[in-house]
Amino acid sequence: MIPVVMMLSVLVLSGVLGGVDPAFSLEGLNLFQQRLIPEKGVFLVASPDMTDPRFHHSVVLLLAHGEDGTLGLIINRDSQIPLSEILPDLESPGVKSHLLLFGGPVGLNELLFLMRSDTPPERATQVMEDVYFSGDRALLEEFLDQNQDSRDLRVYMGRAGWAPGQLENEIARGGWGLVRGDSYRVFEEDLDDLWRDLSAPPETPRFVVRGGVNPGVLAQFVSLGTYTGR
């Protein structure tokens, strides 16, 4: 039997020449993308069967992953604590508009923050695209002085961490799903909806076939898409 990906490529190529009009770009087809691995800029999405109550229905943004272990932040859990209560000595105008978020069960006496910026901030590390993280108090004050709202700045109490090899074992046991991160979900999507949206099964790719397809060939692709003959 011809491998599925090869058969799909042949079907799409012959379809373009013979009247098959794909309803989406090949660039968005997951079969042609490498499987995600744990690395910075990736979301860890807790399995519905997650047994650790500290991560129940959580979405974690990975900040670093390597031989020394893994660092991340839970991004969908609000602590309901005003930032001004934690940093009462700050007089920046932006401090009153921020609520502290719960970043994870480790280091609860520490603050880390995510920021969105078109230019790389000093004393910060890039996570993805225009998203950076830091624990530098002076940099946080600079952003608050600019009256940054929650669409560009998120401050977290605590963090999530894994020892070397620990996260890979949890993923192998089905505890986490991996999704490519993006700044919209970090800063703008409703926190209450984030886990549900990311844990939902992806939509099935849809093809529109104008000229018809050989039934024997079509039968091999019933799990890849829905076809409508015209």
Image (cartoon, grey):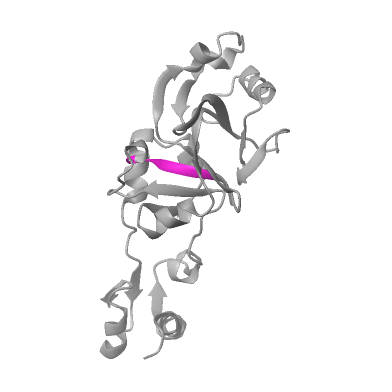
> Most extreme residue toward the right, as rendered?
122
Q: Nearer the viewer, residue 109 or 223?
A: 109
The correct choice, above or below, for 28 with respect to 68 in the image is: below
x then y, percent, for residue 125: 66, 40
Taking the image as shown, residue 94 lies to the left or right of residue 43, namely right
Q: In this view of the protein, can residue 212 be seen by the observer?
A: no
x then y, percent, for residue 51: 30, 45
Q: Nearer the viewer, residue 51 or 102?
A: 51
Q: Quadrant of the C terminus?
A: bottom left
Taking the image as shown, residue 92 lies to the left or right of residue 10, namely right
Q: Residue at x 36, y 91 (%)?
A: 1
Q: Residue at x 61, y 13 (%)?
A: 92
The correct choice, above or below, for 11 with respect to 53 in the image is: below
Taking the image as shown, residue 146 lies to the left or right of residue 7, namely right
x then y, percent, for residue 139: 68, 25
Range shown magenta: 56-62
